[in-house]
Amino acid sequence: MRTRLQLLLPILGCLAPGGLAPGGLAGQLPVGLAAEASVGYAAPVGDFADAEAGFTAEAGAAFAAGGSVWPIQEFGIFGGYRYTTFGCARCEQFDLDGSAVLKGVEAGIEFASPVAVGIVAPRLRGSLVWQTLGFSRQDERLTSGTETGFAVAAGLPVALAGRLELIPWLRFDSVPAGFTFSNLPDRSVDVTSLTFDVAVAYRF
Amino acid sequence: MKYGLTSLAAAALLMAGCSETTTPTSAGLEQAVFTALGGLEVGEVLRLTGADAADLMVGGQELERGFVFIPFNASRAAGRINVEVSGDGLGQTDPSGPGVASSRGAGATAPWLPNSSMHTVLNDRFRSVAEPRLDSFQRQRPVYRSVRREAAADLSGGNAEVGELVEINTSVAAGSFNEICESFDNRTGRVEAITDRAIIVGDVDNPAGGFTRADYESFGDEFDSLVDPTITSTFGEPSDIDGNDRVIIFFTRAVNELTTPGSQGFVGGFFYSRDLFLKEGAEACRASNAGEIFYILAPDPNAQASHVPHSRAAVFTAALGTIGHEYQHLINASRRIWIHGFSSFETTWLDEGLSHIGEELLFYADANVDPRSNIGASNLDSQTIVDAINRFGVSNLVRYGLYLENVTREAPTQPDDDLETRGAAWSFLRYLADQRAEDDAAFFFALVNTERTGFDNLAAVLDDEPLDWFQRWGVSVYTDDLVGGEAVSLLQQPSWDFRSLLPLLGIFEEPFPLRVRTLNPGQTVGFQVAATSSGYVRFTGGAGEVVRLSTTSGSVAPPSQLRVTVVRIE
């Protein structure tokens, strides 16, 4: 439980910037603003899911928050924070907690289709991510260096009440995670995953 | 737009602040994460020091994997530390597996081979009494160049003539500086050959069946063509206090007589730094021969001068290597005293190691091969290489093999400077030169031409802590020509393939004589490791098992001087 609370606190903190944006700002400026928070299910893919030798991850939960600026209606600039936990069944064998955490920020562009498919207008998002992969045990934590990866996502926004939208996203992440050890050779892990996020967005 | 971007930037900054920064972590957590990420690959190493080495974690691979645990005693001071190691998650280790060799204990009998310990004894003894006087000597001694003009001994200047009889003091008596300098054991020698760089003198009382004048001339010629250019181009020119532009090589039974029953090997020759003092003037030493001279074994097929017979052929084959060895000693001491005006002699183990490097350099020159050629069994198709090994290489190989047999008890820096220590010191210096892969001659020249000695000398030339290099070399002792893979250059000894050469010597109980212990489930392996040396324990990680090794020293946590390396070898 303590772990879960620790996990949520930074997310709540990171939600603040989007939430703090003045509600009337969009009305005063020729741009649109949006804030978004999501929860999801992340599944490792590729070697990250089935390494011949090395770390093998299992599925876990993903949390994210971010905001976007829309200079024009179809095109937005996006920034956000992501926190993904991957399961690690074998980690206990090594005296580690049973999960590995990938977290960090991202920034990219977002495209909103002007043409609806059925009742929704698809969104596409591409971003660069700067994230770390971390392992922990008891009160200790070891994280990789922050490296640059990328993510692509497709979403189908569904209008809810007022300015609220519900956006299911399917997302692919690829992030290298390099570990530098003081007494051991360096190691690098390619963190690749598919994530199904459900986001709630608010357009200012 | 301005406000929108500002807001976004502020948000991004705040969100970035949400990510953690990397903080120092414990060695245990690093090992746990590293092992979770797949652990060591073949040829990779884990290094830990002191208390961090108390608990090690490796393994976790799906299949059984082989490792070697290498504790190293990181101390400049002579002495040993205890090491005990046990483990969980171990598989069975085949005692005849890769790299596992002798369990031969103490008391291994050294074969008969040249042991230049005599000049070690002499010069250690003389150093202790002479060094306190060197400061005074350096303040008062005549200018080096003027000494040459003052030289008036029989073999000085241009006085020497073939056939001339000369008196040479061969005394090696112990005592104070004054006692040593008043001790005489004169032998009569006949000048047998004079070449551009050497005066060869034979003791008129040498045993029958010895060298002819043609033999002496042959030594002189080869000294000029091989020994002198090879040795001086690396270490520098010796002094020339007797002004004859030559070194004096005295083949005398006085050397044979120094081998006594119970000796380790036999005395093949010696250089005595006493002879670099003048007979008159500052810190005068009347017993000195006041010249650049060394003393070499005489053939003695009937064992008249000692209990060890030496055929003419055997001495003829080995003498030039001994001369090269002694020449480095002469150069090292004479340049310190006369060329540079220093007040220190080199520490024995380093001085000896450099002399064995001198022998090795003669091998390369004679065989016409370069260092870092990984000379091994496959090179013995060449008769030139075989001959050169027999002349200049065998002794080093044997001494190194003896060290491997007693690897935890012996070390490259031990004060006793026995055969094992010399074999180790030679191999260590060769490893340093090979790993630097620069100009070998410049490296060895720097080690000789300095006022610093021993560890301080090494540290200055390496610009690094020597103990780190002793540790790396200790790992390479096991892994060389055994463990492949990428990025393993530090694990290799590029000049020699000992694993294929040493078995051919046929004198060790095991083909490759490195003493390697094995650690199996439920066992605790304990031993002592000498300062600057390493021990070797093979173990196997069971399939899918995480191996946890526990290391103690005298049943308590390892001291900071204990460093541990674990190498995955298969």
Image (cartoon, rainbow, N blue to C red):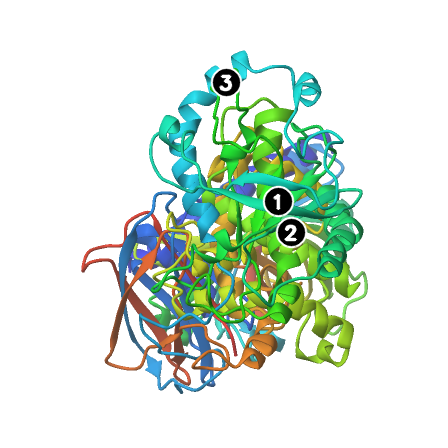
Residue B7 vs A167, above or below: the answer is: above
Chain bearing mark 1: B
Asked whether residue A36 is in view, the answer is: no
Say which residue appears at 76% left-offset and 58% top-offset.
B218
The residue wearing badge 2 is B324
Q: Looking at the rendering, which quadrant does residue B361 occupy?
A: bottom right
Q: Are marks 3 and 1 on the same chain?
A: yes
**Contact? badges 2 and 1 (CB < 8 Å):** yes
Locate the N terminus of chain B by quadrant: top right
Chain bearing mark 2: B
**Considering only order in the chain, which callout, 3 or 2, is on the residue closer to the N terminus?**
3
Residue B367 vs B267, above or below: the answer is: below
The residue wearing badge 3 is B137
The residue wearing badge 1 is B328
Say which residue appears at 43% left-offset and 54% top-offset.
B258
- Give coordinates of residue A192: x percent, y percent: 62, 69
In the structure shown, which secondary structural element does the residue marked by tag 2 occupy? helix
